[in-house]
Amino acid sequence: MLLKRIDETLTQGLYDLDGGPAEVEVYLAEPSIGEGIVNWEVVREGVVPPDFLHYNDAADGSNKLNGSWQGLYVSEAALEEAVIYSGSSIYFSDGSPNFGGVAKSAIYLRYSRGFIDWLAGFDSAAAEKLRSEIPAFEALMENRATKKLPTAWHKFKAPPQKWPLIVVCRLSDGRFLVHWLNKDTEGTLPLEALGIDVVHSRELMGFLTAPATSELELIAEEFQTGSGLGRNAFGKEYKLDAIRRSEYLRLMGVAPENTRADVLDLWSKKLQYRRKVAPSPDTSTLIFLPEGELTYSELKEFIDKENEKKNLYFDAKKNGGKSEEEREELKALRPEIIPTPYSATVFLTNLEGSTKKKRIIQQIFPDVSLEYLQVLNAELLQSNLENTVVDYMKAALTGQTGDTPSVYRYWTEVFTRALQRQPISAREVFANFQRFARSQSGEALIDKLGARRYFRVIGKLLRLQHLIMTAREEPAKLLTNEFQQELVRIEQFNLISRGVFGPMSTTVPSGAELIGEAYGLLRDKQKSKLDNFIRQAWAGVPDSEFPIFVRGALAGMLLNELCWSVQQEGRRFSATQGRHPSRLRGRELQNVFNKGIGLLMNLDKEQLFNCRLLPFLKSLEPESRRDSFNSGLISGMTYFEKKSDDNNEVKHD
């Protein structure tokens, strides 16, 4: 499907980028044989026109093209008699040479009998020098019979973003004989300035044979497979020059109307936006193709700006310290308004494999509004939702910090639904709260308020839900200051909008409805605190679990008060009594209350605790065994209002 859309983009005339740069930065790399390895050294650097350079990335699934250079060395044939190929997808890919491939072809050529005999025809001294090095080259071989080089046969750190020109040998006059030049280009000055013997280097390229091509050719092995059980379940192999068109379409997916060169030119300039998602967060990316009247250059400008905003934001975030103002300015940036409601097709992809990478298309999103995408990207940057969700799931699912695919599964669901303007759900966040709690120590969860991370995640998801629903119902409102203020209030649970657990009422249930008669036994401060908690938690818990969650939260608040009362009297008392908070259930929870109240009674201070609630607390024993109750208990133990003269906080030991 990706190849088909690329072909359609070309056919519709939407691809309008220039062919490429006017000049290419190059370097000359010269080999020397060391102890068990070939060392490479950069001996010249400069710039040359791109048409001076040779490029041919013909498909090489059978290793025929790549293997021809090793075959040249083994056969000891003359250059004019040997069949050595002028291209291979192993040597060239994504518009530039792969150093390891072109270097290996050059090293086999350098010590082949046919090349040395040809070289002796105009520089016998250079030829004799190469002959003297052959024993050292032979000593490198992993297999003396096949003349195969080992995997780690060379040592070199290639300069980034530069085109390698491989020196086959240095001539007696100091000039370089270079591999992989375009033999059909006129002009020599840029190459001569680098010290290259242009005439003989181009003559050398004349001995090469161009790989055979077919109308039904392999475009790119990254998203096509012509062999292997993945596409050929019965193990049958086909030659592309003899394959039936129907079988080609089955194997390759589509036969493009445009030339392979045009398709690969667009692919080399693919428009990407990195987004970590499952199952391969390290390689996943969004790829964009234009729709309607949107040209490729206009879409490129848009994607470049989005990438720039993201990079600026994270660069400022990494700097820390004095860059705080910069981060706030970037957060405050409003997305630029697209003057026309342009749309694009978005492919969510990832790469699999090590040597022969394959592009896997996970999902396709047609007709994605660029205006909405800007707003969505700005929201995800500002709220930092991705990292907040992933960090929570790391704790819940693995208890570790590594980016395993499983911790991105829920985030992937959230992001892909948001991209389609579909409502999101936080049920998985609630369902994993107990696992999240058990992954942390009691100190981290309660004393250091780690349990509050749950509501931070929910608050950010509520923001995103409000954005999605507003984009569906009132898209013109998205870029207003009023909308931005609403997002802040929603995240702080000061505004009830759309829930993330299905349809919800904007009318918050009262404490009496949730607690029953015991609500009337609460002291005024306790009622106020519980009411505030209910208001803030109403949008953060599924409706069906909310009553028991709130009763658990009240038990946590009362346990918090009991601890503070005992500690105020000079006695040490812990709310958990050495247990993990997730174990405070049933009889164990009752024992903690009984022990604390017993300590107050021994001090004749039982009036400090609201003992009228003891029957209510006793009645909670059966339902306190449920996860929803315990989740509420933990949340209640970490819920503190702003401190005032008559409102004291407690620190749990």
Image (cartoon, helix red, strand yellow):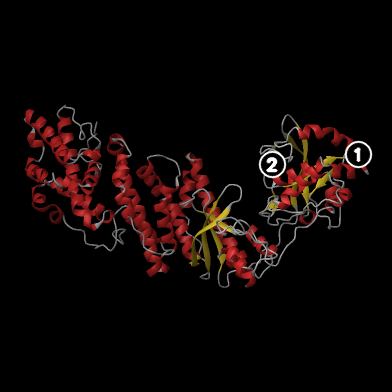
Answer above or below: position of 271 versus 446: below
Image quadrant occupied by the C terminus? top left
**Horizontal relation, residue 54 to residue 493: left or right:** right
Give left or right: position of 632 versus 69.
left
- Is there any visible trace of residue 24 in the rendered image? yes
Residue type marked 2: Ala
- On screen, residue 471 versus residue 362, left or right, reads left
Tell me the residue at 71%/61% (across/down).
19
Q: Residues within 10 Å of mark 1 (few under 14, many from 20)?
A: few
Image coords of residue 124 (percent x, y): 92, 39
Instruction: State whether residue 13 is above or below residue 191.
Output: below
Please tell me in which quadrant of the rendered image residue 231 appears.
Answer: bottom right
Where does residue 277 sit, x and y in percent of width and height? 46, 52
Q: Position of residue 99 (x, y in %)?
A: 70, 45
Q: From mark 1 to mark 2, how far is it between C-alphas?
A: 27 Å
Q: Report the disc number at residue 173.
A: 1
Query: Which quadrant, please, contains the N terminus?
Result: bottom right
Expressed as whole percent of the image width and height from the top left, the position of residue 212 reads: 75, 60
- List the residue tagged with mark 2: 158
| Image: 413 above or below 404 | below
